[in-house]
Image (spheres, rainbow, N blue to C red):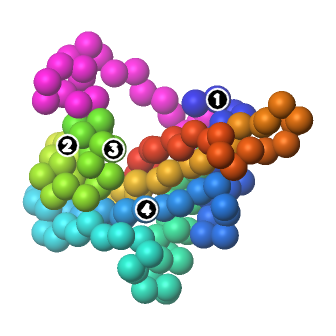
Amino acid sequence: MNKKELSEIRKNFSDTSDLFVLNQVATAFVDSEKNIRCQTSRAYHNIASEESDCLMATLKRVLAGTLGKGLLEYEFPKEAYEEGGSQAILYEALQSKLEDETAVTTLMEQIVRNMDYISTYAILVGHCTYTVFQKSKSDELDPYQSHDYRFLVAA
């Protein structure tokens, strides 16, 4: 991801944007012994307004850093691309749109295994869709020519 793409996502990361949709939100609460105490995955539009505002604000803060400082890009070692590796786990969660309980559980367990935190904490993962419209030959946005980009954002 580069600065321009990040800026575009930040600008449209809201409930009021026509280009951005937060589809599904998975949450997990982890105790100090690294046990997942509670885990849910819910459609964002079914969450009560007060809670959905809090979730959106939290996920927005994830994008508040700058590339190289608050936002870091990690290189995945070759093992991550093997079956059962980190990339496969992330890809399965993305493909399932956080609706498959097994994929969500596997993702949450992978995050917990790799977290080095000695207190209780919560994990939030959102499945998002960002639509980019193509311009027509007359240089106008064509609603029939668009690409949907799906991504996960986690806090």
> Dot 3: what SS?
helix
Q: Secondary structure at mark 4?
A: strand
* First of labels 1, 4 by sequence position: 1
Question: What kind of residue is marked 1?
Answer: Asn
- Which residue was labeled with disc 4? 23
Note whether 136 is above or below 63 in the view shown.
Answer: above
Residue 145 located left or right of residue 130: right
Q: Amino acid at mark 2?
A: Gln
Whole-percent x, y for residue 113 in the image: 17, 43
For residue 2, the mark is 1
Against 99, residue 53 (above or below) is below
Which one is in front, 33 or 94?
A: 94
Question: What residue is disc 3 on?
Answer: 94
Are dots 3 and 4 in contact, CB under 8 Å? no
Checking the image for residue 110, the label placed there is: 2
N-terminal-most mark, 4 or 2 = 4
Q: Is residue 73 above or below residue 130?
A: above
Q: Mark 1 or 4, which is nearer the eye? A: 4
Real-space Cα distance between discs 3 and 2? 14 Å
Pointers 4 and 2 in contact (C-beta within 8 Å) = no
Which secondary structure, mark 1? Answer: loop
Say if residue 115 shows up in the picture: no
In this view, the residue in front, 44 or 33, is 44
What is the C-alpha distance between the residues marked 4 and 2?
22 Å
State the extent of the magenta-drawn residues as a range: 66-88
Q: Nearer the viewer, residue 113 or 126?
A: 126
- The reply to whether the magenta stretch includes residue 140 is no
* Relative side of 155 to 117, left or right: right
